[in-house]
């Protein structure tokens, strides 16, 4: 194997941000789209976690999306994403915000959870982002960077739970930031639909070979 393999699921926010970093870095991978309810044995053998995304190279297995981002950008960072990381924001997204998001979106999976209370907890984090975006167009400064990409796919997931409510809130700069991302060529380029991978299939490469 010379080209790394990426096990991915199109709509997973973790997989999205991994693909965004790979795209920015120009790291070509063999993309294997999976069904989360029917994961291929090859992915499970590579990573006992059996969750997407997973990158498999000749020498290592990466099964955390942030590790994939860091690995890709360490090799090539043409947009200088690594210069604009706000680790506090990213880690808060992955912990406090994501915990509340899950309990808001999937409330029936948890005992004694009030989804609206969880929505309010998540909203506190989004209000923090709004205060940053009032002062600058992106979370890392004047241009899109690591912090934006590490967070925006989860904000998208939160917004889609109740889009009407989300758009009625007093965070206009956050709304603009999210909508600009969703309408961007960058986002559309990583959201192309691919068939579910089968071992006998011809390889699909991402970004596409030209």
Image (tube, rainbow, N blue to C red):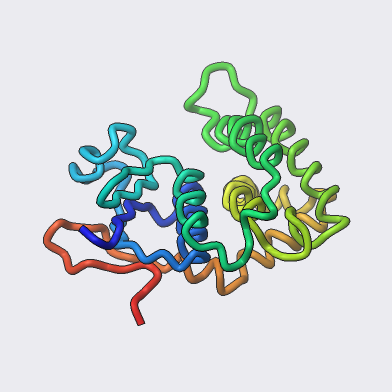
Closer to us: 199 or 22? 22
In the image, residue 177 above or below residue 159: below
Give the image quarter of residue 45. top left
Q: x%, y% of residue 49?
A: 33, 33
Q: Residue furthest bottom?
A: 210
The quarter of the image holding the N terminus is bottom left
- The tally of labels here is 0
Percent coordinates x, y for residue 171 in the rendering: 82, 51
> Is residue 100 shown left or right of residue 201?
right
Snapshot quadrant of residue 195: bottom left
Q: Among all residues in the image, which is located at the extreme top?
A: 112
* Picture residue at 67% right of the left edge, 35% below the top: 92
Residue at 24 percent of width and 38 percent of height:
44
Relative depth, front residue between 180 and 165: 180
Q: Quadrant of residue 194?
A: bottom left
**95 versus 78 height, above or below:** above
In the image, residue 8 lies at what x, y percent? 36, 53
Looking at the rendered image, the quarter that the C terminus falls into is bottom left
Q: Nearer the viewer, residue 86 or 118?
A: 86
In the image, is residue 39 above or below residue 3? above
Q: Is residue 176 left or right of residue 13?
A: right
């Amino acid at each position: 194997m010379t080209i790394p393999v990426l096990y991915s699921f199109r709509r997973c926010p973790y997989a999205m941000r991994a693909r965004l970093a790979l795209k920015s870095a120009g790291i070509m991978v063999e993309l294997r789209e999976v069904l989360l309810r029917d994961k291929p044995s090859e992915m499970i053998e590579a990573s006992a976690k059996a969750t997407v995304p997973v990158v498999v190279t000749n020498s290592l297995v990466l099964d955390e999306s942030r590790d994939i981002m860091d690995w890709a950008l360490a090799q090539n960072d043409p947009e200088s994403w690594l210069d604009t990381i706000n680790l506090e924001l990213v880690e808060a997204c992955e912990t406090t915000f994501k915990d509340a998001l899950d309990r808001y979106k999937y409330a029936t999976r948890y005992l004694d959870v009030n989804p609206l209370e969880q929505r309010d907890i998540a909203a506190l984090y989004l209000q923090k982002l709004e205060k940053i975006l009032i002062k600058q167009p992106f979370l890392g400064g004047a241009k899109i960077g690591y912090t934006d990409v590490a967070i925006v796919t989860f904000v998208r997931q939160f917004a889609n739970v109740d889009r009407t409510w989300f758009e009625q809130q007093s965070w206009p700069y956050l709304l603009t930031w999210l909508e600009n991302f969703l309408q961007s060529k960058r986002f559309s380029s990583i959201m192309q639909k691919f068939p579910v991978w089968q071992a006998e299939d011809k390889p699909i490469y991402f970004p596409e070979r030209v």
